């Protein structure tokens, strides 16, 4: 165990925790926007898988990571349109529709992968940025200045999402339609348009989260996301629908995951124990959800479809 | 579906100022003409060929019972419903109003019965909602400035930075009115604006309304409170079953006349309650302390006594602890301290079953949530209390023959209008559902009655009926605790009136001393030396 508590190992663990937090953060921020507008999307996992596959196959075919990122976001947007149609236009029950989106993403990406790729081919994935002197700093350099561009994008989105929610008319509309859609409607806010926009933005971010994951590990496989999308939904509750809270949760899960990995790598936990240790994020999710289950701050109209009763 | 509004950011010029037609005598056309409006919902005609004309500077009242079509008509005007037939003209020009945004464009503002405010946003944010900010930014500075200016001009004091959830009901209503005035509404629709207000707040509201009409704005005022209607209206249009059944003015009619028009038959207002001697104390609530849903203290040191043969009215504005009081007495809410005694016996840890066994019956305020099960049949609802007692159940088996007999008897005795005993209760009208609840509760042997909001939302006829039954129970020697937000009801029926404010009893006044002014003032929390009841 003492092997773990050395400066280099701790720094490496925290740095990889920040890296692993990136997909959690992107998808959970996206889900936050959707939920603030009153739409629960349990299908984040499925959208992440589709984004991951889109990024992987595009990067594989074109050799371009940037194209992969674009493809992941486009795939997310397409899923957003689908989900908006199901929930906003057709008024389907959101919980169960999200499960449907998940199952679709799981099966569809596996099918495409088998047909188009077959045996896994690694791709050139994301690289850490080299910020010269900053990256070379001891400790601080490894912790903060050697990550991939998408990690910086994800963390930069935290204040951006806060600003968008609290300082723009779009954010005001989103909060109003998530809380009291009837009131927004009587003031001429187009409730279902705002919700559709929020859903699409959220899904673009989920797609990007999946793309980040695939490009980070440089590979695609069935169920690559392994429940991260569901954890992202839990993080929204954990973060009480605030971007800073969501960020704290994403970091927590990132660091827990990286710690488990590090302990395995160092051989501190082995065999059956390591399988059990791999459940740490799942157990943490349950604990977190029990602790924050009072739903303080939840948008009042979450999961409630809106229709003017004409 | 909605054209984008051209409402610009706060502080910018009003969208109508340029196009506003001259008002007053200079304008030949009325402010609003609705002609031949018909709106059908599946199975119901909500509006049938309704005409309504509003002139600038007048208060035009729409009067009618629940379900008469008042709300439907104004929802059509505000673009929330599309009419099946009919025409709307504003300032003489025919208009289409497909959405609230379009209504706002035409200078129409609406004060909804259930306030259309987002509780988690501030007053200023609620006002700014739906307006286009400059470059998409929600800059509250200019909104706040203009809101304060509007607020001062109309004497509607408000804190623009307060969250709606922090505001009292009266303040929320001011926010709602300001929202419309901020948008330069020239025609304001007020849907039951006084339902949630105390009498002094109503006076303030009316002062505001008069200042608005003085400026030449037109008001459509919806109410079923006759005294208010006589007070504020210039014109009155009476609706019944979706049709206009009369047009009049306060000078040409009386409250009785209005009531008769509403109901369609002669109505006698006011009710003589014969004096009678009271018996022993049946229900004694002593220094009760109870927490509300959010853990706050909602009843504090609250005491009330009800004797055999009397009705004690608990008057107050909604949300001052009335629901918690009823629930605590009936064992639905834990008691922090204090006691509830029935016939001198303290119930240690009350449960509804124990309380009922001691002869207490309960008519809860929300009949569809706590009073009756909407998806169950009329007979099932009638039997909810007695279903497991002989002769209705023997050896765990329901005796359907006996149950049916009993239910038919109740339906006849309490004049419940239902096609069959097996009819789903939610298909009945509000008044008839209430009759089902009352039939169940009043028919039992219970002689202590806790009755909450028994006539809320039901028509005059059904309300009269409920009042008769209450007085009948009183005459038979029952102890009745009548919890009501309808001040008239409390004053009419009660032998004593207890005003509840923020969980405390403000007074305990015998009938003779409970004047409207006095009780109304106490409802706002203005304390007076509590006189010892005679």
Image (tube, coloured by chain):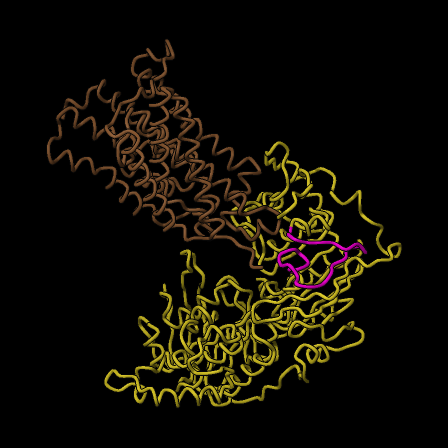
Chain colours: A brown, B yellow
Task: Check residue A210 for magenta coloring.
Answer: no
Q: Nearer the viewer, residue A223 or B211?
A: A223
Q: Residue furthest top?
A: A133
Residue at 56% x, 71% y is B43
Q: Residue furthest left?
A: A271
- For the C terminus of chain B, give its image quadrant: bottom right
Q: Nearer the viewer, residue B456 or B74?
A: B74
Magenta segment, which residues?
B75-100
Residue A299 picture location, percent across and down = 46, 48
Residue A256 picture location, percent across and down = 25, 32
Q: Nearer the viewer, residue A160 or B313?
A: A160
Residue B278 picture location, percent across and down = 49, 87
Residue at 35% x, 81% y is B358
In the depicted structure, whether residue A72 falls above or below residue B122: above
Residue at 69% x, 46% y is B182
Q: Which quadrant of the figure has residue A119?
A: top left
Q: From where the camera sits, is residue B157 visible? A: no
Q: Which quadrant of the figure has residue B7?
A: top right
Q: Residue furthest right?
A: B26
Q: Which quadrant of the figure has residue B437?
A: bottom left
Q: From where the camera sits, is residue B335 visible? A: yes
Task: Check residue B89 for magenta coloring.
Answer: yes
In the depicted structure, whether residue B153 falls above or below residue B493: above
Total numbered circles: 0
Residue B60 picture location, percent across and down = 75, 64
In the depicted structure, whether residue B312 falls above or below residue A195: below
Would residue A263 be found to the left or right of residue A187 on screen? left
């Amino acid at each position: 165990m003492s092997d773990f508590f050395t400066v280099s190992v701790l720094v490496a663990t925290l740095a990889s925790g920040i890296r692993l937090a990136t997909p959690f953060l992107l998808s959970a921020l996206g889900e936050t926007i959707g939920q603030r507008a009153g739409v629960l999307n349990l299908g984040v996992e499925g959208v992440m898988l589709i984004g991951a596959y889109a990024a992987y196959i595009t990067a594989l075919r074109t050799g371009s990571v940037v194209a992969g990122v674009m493809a992941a976001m486009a795939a997310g947007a397409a899923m957003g349109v689908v989900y908006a149609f199901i929930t906003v236009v057709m008024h389907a029950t959101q919980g169960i529709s999200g499960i449907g989106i998940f199952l679709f993403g799981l099966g569809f990406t596996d099918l495409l992968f088998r047909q188009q790729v077959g045996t896994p081919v690694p791709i050139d994935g994301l690289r850490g940025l080299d910020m010269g002197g900053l990256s070379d700093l001891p400790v601080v350099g490894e912790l903060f200045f050697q990550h991939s561009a998408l990690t910086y994008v994800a963390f930069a989105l935290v204040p951006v999402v806060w600003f968008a929610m609290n300082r723009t008319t779009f954010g005001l509309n989103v909060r109003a339609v998530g809380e009291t859609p009837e009131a927004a409607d009587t003031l001429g806010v187009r409730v279902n348009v705002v919700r559709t926009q929020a859903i699409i933005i959220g899904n673009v971010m989920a797609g990007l989260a999946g793309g980040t994951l695939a490009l980070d590990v440089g590979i695609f496989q069935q169920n690559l996301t392994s429940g991260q999308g569901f954890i992202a939904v839990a993080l929204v509750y954990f973060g009480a629908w605030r971007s800073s809270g969501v960020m704290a949760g994403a970091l927590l899960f990132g660091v827990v995951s990286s710690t488990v990995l590090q302990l395995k790598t160092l051989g501190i936990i082995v065999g059956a124990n390591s399988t059990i240790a791999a459940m740490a994020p799942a157990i943490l999710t349950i604990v977190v959800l029990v602790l924050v289950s009072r739903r303080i701050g939840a948008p009042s109209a979450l999961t409630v479809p809106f229709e003017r009763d004409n | 579906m909605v054209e984008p509004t051209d409402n610009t950011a706060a502080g910018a010029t009003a969208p109508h100022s340029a196009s506003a037609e001259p008002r007053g005598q200079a304008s030949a056309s009325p402010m609003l003409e609705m002609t031949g409006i018909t709106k059908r919902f599946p199975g119901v005609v909500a509006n049938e060929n309704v005409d309504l004309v509003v002139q600038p500077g007048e208060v035009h009242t729409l009067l009618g019972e629940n379900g008469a079509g008042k709300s439907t008509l104004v929802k059509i005007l505000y673009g929330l419903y599309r009419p099946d037939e009919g025409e709307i003209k504003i300032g003489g020009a025919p208009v289409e109003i497909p959405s609230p945004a379009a209504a706002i464009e035409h200078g129409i503002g609406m004060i909804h019965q259930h306030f259309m405010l987002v509780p988690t946003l501030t007053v200023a944010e609620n006002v700014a909602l739906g307006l286009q900010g400059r470059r998409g930014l929600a800059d509250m500075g200019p909104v706040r400035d203009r809101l304060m200016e509007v607020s001062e001009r109309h004497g509607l004091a408000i804190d623009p930075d307060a969250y709606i959830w922090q505001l009292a009901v009266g303040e929320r209503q001011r926010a709602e009115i300001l929202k419309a005035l901020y948008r330069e509404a020239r025609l304001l629709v007020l849907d039951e604006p006084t339902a949630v207000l105390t009498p002094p707040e109503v006076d303030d509201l009316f002062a505001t309304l008069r200042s608005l009409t003085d400026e030449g704005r037109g008001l459509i005022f919806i109410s079923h409170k006759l005294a208010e209607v006589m007070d504020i209206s210039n014109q009155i249009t009476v609706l019944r079953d979706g049709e206009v059944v009369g047009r009049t003015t306060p000078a040409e009619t009386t409250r009785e006349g209005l009531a008769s028009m509403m109901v369609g038959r002669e109505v006698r207002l006011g009710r003589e309650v014969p004096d009678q001697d009271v018996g022993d104390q049946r229900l004694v609530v002593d220094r009760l302390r109870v927490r509300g849903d959010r853990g706050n203290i909602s009843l504090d040191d609250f005491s009330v006594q009800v004797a055999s043969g009397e009705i004690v009215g608990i008057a107050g504005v909604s949300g001052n602890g009335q629901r918690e009081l009823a629930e605590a007495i009936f064992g639905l809410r834990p008691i922090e301290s204090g006691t509830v005694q029935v016939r001198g016996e303290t119930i240690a840890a009350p449960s509804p079953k124990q309380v009922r066994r001691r002869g207490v019956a309960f008519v809860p305020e929300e009949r569809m949530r706590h009073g009756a099960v909407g998806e169950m049949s009329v007979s099932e609802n009638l039997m909810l209390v007695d279903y497991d007692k002989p002769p209705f159940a023997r050896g765990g088996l329901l005796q359907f023959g006996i149950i049916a007999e009993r239910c038919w008897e109740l339906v006849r005795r309490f004049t419940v209008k239902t096609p069959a005993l097996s009819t789903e209760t939610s298909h009945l009208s509000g008044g008839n559902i209430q009759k089902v609840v009352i039939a169940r509760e009043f028919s039992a042997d219970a002689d202590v009655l806790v009755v909450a909001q028994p006539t809320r939302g039901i028509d005059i006829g059904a309300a009269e009926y409920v009042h008769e039954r209450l007085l009948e129970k009183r005459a038979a020697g029952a102890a009745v605790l009548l919890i009501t937000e309808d001040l008239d009801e409390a004053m009419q029926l009660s032998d004593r009136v207890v005003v509840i404010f923020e969980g405390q009893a403000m007074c305990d006044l015998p009938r003779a001393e409970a004047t409207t002014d006095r009780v109304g003032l106490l409802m706002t929390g203005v304390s007076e030396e509590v006189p010892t009841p005679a």
